[in-house]
Amino acid sequence: MKKSIASEVKVRAVLEVLKGEKSALEIAGGIGCHPTILKEWKERFLVAAPKTKKVEDEKVRRIETLERLIGKLTVQNEFLKKVHESFDSR
């Protein structure tokens, strides 16, 4: 039967391997898995990391675009309020 290890534990273990402060054998022993499994997690992590960064960058760009749009609409709204008020005061 396969042992289930939480994703958080896997990520922490991979990050430890990448830091290089401990060997993969030490880290794998600490979480109860074989070093080969840890190597597979590391490879998957390194493949997925750039994709995750790209998605985050796209989200940041989208937020920046929406913030600029909100600013523009706010300025236009204030202008139209002032124009409307000037016509009402006549």
Image (spheres, rainbow, N blue to C red):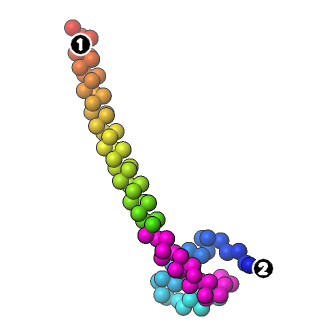
What residue lies at 67% left-to-right and 75% top-to-bottom? Answer: 5
Location of residue 24 (image quadrant): bottom right
Q: Is residue 3 left or right of residue 39?
A: right
Q: Are there few (<14), some (14-19), or many (20+) residues within 10 Å of tag 1?
A: few
Q: Nearer the viewer, mark 1 or mark 2?
A: 2
Q: CA distance from mark 1 to mark 2?
A: 79 Å
* Residue position for label 2: 1
Q: Residue 58 occupies which quadrant of the picture?
A: bottom left
Q: Residue at x 25, y 22 (%)?
A: 82
Quadrant placement of the N terminus: bottom right
| Residue receiving disc 1 | 87
Name the residue at 32% across, 40% down: 69
Range of magenta residues: 31-50
Q: Is residue 38 magenta?
A: yes
Q: Considering the numbered disc 1 on the image, is that residue within a helix, a strand or a loop?
A: helix
Q: Nearer the viewer, residue 37 or 88?
A: 37
Whether residue 12 is visible? no
Can you give x and y, in whole percent of width and height, for residue 32 in the image? Answer: 68, 84
Q: For the residue marked with disc 1, what is the amino acid? A: Phe
Q: Secondary structure at mark 2?
A: loop
> Relative to residue 53, is residue 2 depicted above or below?
below
Residue in the image at 31% along x and 43% along y: 68
Residue 54 lies, with reference to residue 84, above or below; the image says below
Position of residue 76 measured from the top left corner of the image (x, y, whole percent): 27, 30
